[in-house]
């Protein structure tokens, strides 16, 4: 039988014993099945694997057909921002808490993995966003985000002033603790905690969720996913502002800066078992009720 995936990369949280144990078991299983295996270098070191198996995440993205990411959603986000740059399928094994992106259980891994390796799977594309910070018309910093880009003051309970433009059309100005610009993937993360809408992953949409606005009429709004969102920071703000990408990457922002947020040209190709059901994930993770018969 022709192998759908010939080279498989293994990535995971290097300081998590459970993730390391799962990766070690996966390596043994995949090697026994005749797959070429690439292990992310920090994990390979922790597992005392031979140097020939050790690769950087960029090399895995370039050379592997499938990346199996073992960890929680937080680790998956970091890996996704890199792997989305390459034509590689990504499968998540949950070793964290919620597991919206990492949907395979380490306790029931081999059977669904065998089916996926045999081509019995669902595939979906998740888009990322790209945030750029401009100062006096010059690009100062930029990065991508899988979940959200958040403009905020950099310290707790400190308001800031900014204006929002959609495709260069003024929408509103606001005094608040900041604003969350979220993808559908991120709609079940920080955005949801701030009262934003849950968006199904297949939507081409972005949500803008104000954080503790100084007005009773401010509400989250959903815009077309191909929109260019511009946040103009008022010149009278203090100087400790920032844009946070997925809570991992921090872009420094100064009063008067402009932040452009738009859809990235890259997408993440996620692989799921054939019985994957997004609404079942929501019911399970958010403790929603079952059917009424």
Image (cartoon, grey):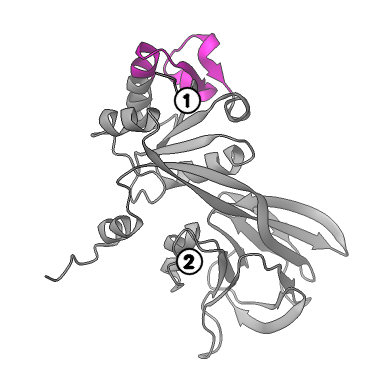
176 sits left or right of 193 in the view: right
Residue 26 spot, x, y in % from top left: 36, 22
Residue 144 spot, x, y in % from top left: 64, 51
Eye-nearest disc, 1 or 2: 1
Residue 293 spot, x, y in % from top left: 11, 70
Q: Does the magenta stretch include residue 37?
A: yes
Residue 127 lies, with reference to residue 215, above or below; the image says above
Q: How far apart are marks 1 and 2 (CA)?
A: 35 Å
Dot 1, how many residues are within 10 Å of its Cα: few (below 14), some (14-19), or many (20+)? Answer: some
Residue 99 lies, with reference to residue 1, above or below; the image says below
Q: If you read the primary sequence from the N terminus, does the residue marked by circle 1 or circle 2 appear first?
A: 1
> Would you name the residue on which mark 2 appears?
191
Give the residue drawn at x 67%, y 84%: 172
Comparing 161 with 246, the one in front is 246
Q: Is residue 82 magenta?
A: no
Residue positioned most to the left: 293
Q: Label 1's element?
A: loop
248 sits left or right of 109 in the view: right
Residue 125 spot, x, y in % from top left: 53, 49
Give the residue drawn at x 48%, y 37%: 90
- Which image quadrant for residue 69? top left
> Would you name the residue on which mark 1 appears?
5
Dot 2, how many residues are within 10 Å of its Cα: few (below 14), some (14-19), or many (20+)? Answer: many
């Amino acid at each position: 039988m022709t192998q759908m995936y010939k080279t498989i990369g293994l990535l995971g949280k290097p300081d998590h014993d459970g993730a390391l144990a799962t990766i070690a078991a996966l390596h043994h299983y995949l090697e026994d099945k005749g797959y070429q295996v690439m292990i992310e270098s920090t994990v390979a070191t922790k597992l005392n694997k031979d140097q020939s198996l050790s690769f950087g995440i960029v090399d895995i993205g370039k050379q592997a057909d499938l990346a199996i990411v073992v960890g929680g959603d937080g680790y998956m986000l970091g890996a996704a921002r890199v792997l989305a740059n390459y034509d590689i399928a990504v499968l998540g094994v949950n070793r964290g808490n919620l597991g919206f992106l990492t949907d395979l259980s380490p306790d029931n891994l081999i059977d669904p993995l065998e089916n996926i390796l045999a081509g019995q799977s669902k595939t979906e594309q998740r888009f990322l966003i790209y945030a750029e910070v401009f100062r006096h018309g010059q690009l100062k910093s930029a990065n991508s985000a899988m979940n959200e880009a958040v403009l905020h003051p950099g310290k707790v309970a400190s308001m800031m002033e900014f204006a929002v433009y959609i495709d260069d059309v003024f929408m509103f100005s606001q005094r608040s603790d900041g604003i969350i610009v979220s993808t559908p993937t991120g709609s079940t993360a920080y955005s949801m905690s701030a009262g934003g809408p849950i968006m199904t992953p297949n939507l081409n949409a972005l949500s803008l969720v104000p954080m503790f606005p100084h007005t009773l009429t401010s509400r989250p709004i959903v815009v077309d996913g191909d929109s260019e969102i511009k946040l103009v920071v008022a010149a009278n703000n203090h100087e400790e502002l920032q844009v946070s990408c997925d809570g991992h990457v921090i872009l420094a922002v100064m009063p008067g800066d402009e932040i452009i947020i738009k859809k990235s040209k890259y997408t993440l190709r996620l692989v799921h078992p054939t019985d994957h059901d997004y609404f079942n994930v929501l019911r399970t993770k958010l403790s929603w009720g079952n059917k009424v018969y």
